[in-house]
Amino acid sequence: MAKNERFLTVDIGATAIKLGEFEIDGNGAVQMTAFAHREYEEELSDDNRINVIEGVLRQMLLEADIHTRRTLLSVSGQTALIRFGQIANFKNDRKQIRQLAEFEAKRNIPFAQDEISLDFQLIAGNENEEGMMDSLDVLSVVVKKDIVEQFIGAVREVGLLPILVDVAPVACYNAARANGLGEKGSVMIVSIGGRSTNLLFLEGNRFFARTIPIAGHTITQQIARKFSIGQPEAEELKRRHGFVAKTDDETGTEATSDVSKIVRNVMRRLYGEISRSISIYKAQQHGGDITKIYLTGGSTILTYCDQFFEEKFGLPVEYFNPLTCMMLNPSIDKQRLSEVAHTFSETIGLALRYTSTCPIEINLLPKEIAHQQSLVYKKPYFVASMVAILVMFFIIQESFKFSLGESNKQLDLYKTERAKFEPAYNEIKAAIGEADGALSQVEEVKTFLMQRAKWPLVIEEIFRAKPDNVWIDSITPIFGEVMPIEKTSIVEEESGAMSGDMFGMGMEMGMMSMDGGMGMDGMMGGAGLPSPTTIGGLSIIAHTISLYGNNVGRDPQLAAEPVYPFEVPEKSADEEGDETETAYDADGNEVEVAKKDDAHLDQSGNLLFLRNLKKSALFSDEEEFTATVSRQKSEMLENGSDFEIQLKFNLPLEAVPWSDAMNNEGGMGGRMGGMGGAMGGMGGGKGGALD
């Protein structure tokens, strides 16, 4: 706890207010630093309760010079409804115990729930023969909410901050337990106040309380009725001449005798109620025999009051001094405090609630007010938190400013360094761009050159597959996609065209641009490469003559296929599945023959030529695309025939159209003519070998 923390306890009774100021030092020790006691100058009612309490409290705080604000309140037992109940002991289910206790506390309350302030607590129960608790006692305290709000409103009006509302019997019980009462037997506390008498039974942890509406005000009313005077005069007469007569026949002056007899009669009625309460305590709470009685409260100062109860109950009677458990500040007037010490049991009980854990802790402060009080109490912490947040934001802002400044310095330094290397970087970047452009041109030329390399290999592969008894008349490119073959015999007028000089092939080859790079020297000297055209296949017109003797069938001199400098797709492996193929007889008619039987071949080389071409990786082996288009007996040679073969490339090939090549610089036409002559010479050479 904080050093020198102070708090205030206020017991608002029916006829007087008692307050005490307490201080907690750094070691946790508690001492009373101030006290005050004052009676009301007028009787309390619902109409004047706030004003009367406010006025009395204000005078008491001024006289005692008290400035403490945190306050614990205690209200009279007359304004509270105290009930005791029992519930079964569910040792392992605290939740169910609390639910039953709350239900028991709310049971039989003669007010609506929103009109009351309610609190309850479990206290010791009854033990069975085995020493186990069969049941638990439930203490419930109910006060009408408007009364509590009136007390709190009056306290707030004088600047106090109420944090707890207790009732007088419970506060007195906590003070008694702190002073050791009831530890060695069953004792009873009789607290005779102005409007009611509170009975408290203490036996170890057991607690039972009962409020009896007989007290000092009852005596005042009887005196006023007896002497036909007003309440103030009767109260004054009671204070001056009142005492408890020792016997019913005690004599003295007429006034003294009458007052003492009235006091004794009221005390006898109170004795009867107390006796009945003891019987209830023993029967319902299973309490033990009372061994001692303690007196407290303002009305117990009547002379011979202690002797009266000692005579009636036959038990030792003693006044309860609650201050024995509390240290007193040296500045306190101990003589004046001793005169009212018997009325401060509730005030001391409230102080114990603030500084320690008490046996019974009841708080009737409404939840709404408790929430407001909590906010008010936490307000400094909220303010401190806001200040801390603002300071934190300020620190963060300054940190960001510092970081931003450092970042800007580094940025300026970086810009300076970057400016030094900017020219070199731009030069390098330009050089990289030039290199990328050159590399792109190299790749383009490489691709172009690769196309140039393909066409000689295509021509070489055609002549590798050509048997010796076949010579080629013309090779014509098929531009674009190759269409499936519609097999028909060559008509008569076409045969004449096919019988031309086979050396004219050089002219046909000169008319197409099979080599994508035929005019490479001229083309590279121009503005750029010509746009290539895709060629899907070739159309070959050739002639064959029949062979005789050992030369019939497949050409035994077929060379191995070369290794290509470019990627060639693999051919399908299901060629072996088809056992037949289409051929032509000597009259040009289609016939189905077995593939693997070479004896079926007629004495011409067209079918062998076709089969050799299909085996090449450069040409497709699909029957509908690579096949003999037509065959017809030659009119010029008795043992010869003319035929046409369509080839589909197995890989994409490109060539430069003749018009583009001619328009390009470098004399593409001359170079193509030269290539045609070379191809013609190649064909002538093959033909010469045949002759």
Image (cartoon, grey):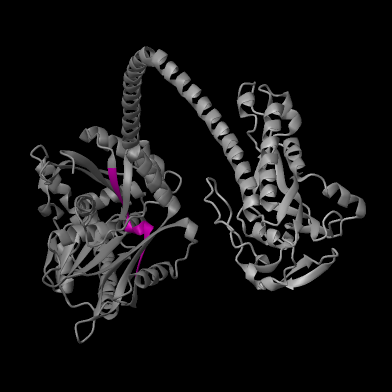
* Image quarter of residue 590: bottom right
Vertically, is 584 above or below 643?
below
How many numbered circles are shown? 0
Residue name at image x 25 percent, y 32 percent: 62
Does any portion of residue 106 appear in the rendered image? yes
Of 362 and 1, nearer the camera is 1
Compared across the picture, whether 57 is left or right of 650 comes to left
Residue name at image x 40 percent, y 51 percent: 366
Q: Is residue 563 magenta?
A: no
Q: Position of residue 338 (x, y in %)?
A: 12, 48
Compared across the picture, whether 229 is left or right of 582 comes to left
Of 630 and 104, nearer the camera is 630
Compared across the picture, whether 65 is left or right of 29 comes to right
Residue name at image x 57 percent, y 35 percent: 449
Q: Position of residue 103 (x, y in %)?
A: 42, 70
Q: Position of residue 155 (x, y in %)?
A: 35, 41
Q: Residue furthest bottom?
A: 129
Q: Is residue 80 magenta?
A: yes
Of 460 and 352, nearer the camera is 460
Compared across the picture, whether 412 is left or right of 594 comes to left
Q: Position of residue 464 (x, y in %)?
A: 62, 53
* Image quarter of residue 282: bottom left
Residue name at image x 64 percent, y 21 percent: 526
Q: Residue furthest left?
A: 330
Numbered range of the magenta stretch: 71-84
